[in-house]
Amino acid sequence: MPLDCDDTLGNGIIASQADHPILKECIDTLGNSWALYPTTPETSELQKLINVVLRSGPYHFQKAFYAAARTYQERCIALPKSYFFPIDYIYTRMNKFKSVEITQELLDKHIKPETFAIHCWAHSWLNASTVPVTSSWEKELPQE
C-alpha cells in the first residue's frame, strides 16, 4: 500500500502489537537523532525547543514510521489528524502557547465524525517566553 501522507505524523497516540518494526526502528534510531541535533551550553532556548521536536518528537517518529513501513509486509495505518488532532497547531500560536479554549464554535468547526479525542496543545513542557508568538520557528525544521 502506498504511503500517501502529506503532513507530519503525530506521535501523541501510538498503538501497536509487541515488537512492532516501526516502534523498534523508532527506538533503535533514537540515539542517532540525539547525535544529529546536539545541545550545548551555547544553544539558544529556541533551538533547544526545535531539538526536542527533531530528536524524539513527531519528526523522529515520522522518519522511523516511513523507514519501517516501506519494508514491513503487514498493514500499517497512520490515521489522519482529524482522529486525534482536529484542532490545528496554529490555534496555539494565536493563543500565545496557552491551552486552546474549547468553545462550541471551535468544536463545530473542527470535529469530524471520525474524531476520537482532541489534543488541546497545553504545552506543559514549554516555557512560552522561549518562543515568541511572532516567531516562525517551524521554518527552522528540516524539510524532507
Image (tube, rainbow, N blue to C red):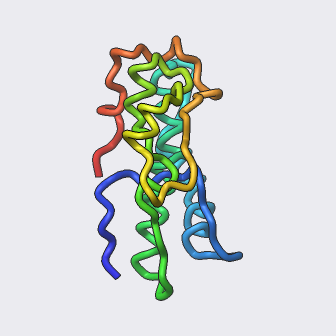
Q: Nearer the viewer, residue 50 or 37?
A: 50
Q: Residue furthest right?
A: 18
Question: Residue 35: x and y, percent?
Answer: 53, 45
Question: Residue 123: x and y, percent?
Answer: 58, 28
Residue drawn at the location 47% of the way across and 45% of the way down: 36
In the rendered picture of this protein, how many numbered marks are placed on residues? 0
Residue drawn at the location 30% of the way across and 68% of the way down: 4
Question: Residue 8: x and y, percent?
Answer: 38, 51
Q: Nearer the viewer, residue 91 or 22?
A: 91
Which quarter of the image is occupied by the N terminus?
bottom left
Residue 119 lies, with reference to residue 84, above or below; the image says above
Residue drawn at the location 33% of the way across and 62% of the way down: 5
Which quadrant of the structure image shows residue 91?
top left
Q: Residue furthest bottom?
A: 73
Question: Residue 54: x and y, percent?
Answer: 47, 43
Residue 104 lies, with reference to residue 126, above or below; the image says below
Residue drawn at the location 50% of the way across and 54% of the way down: 115
| Residue 61 in the figure: left or right of residue 28 | left
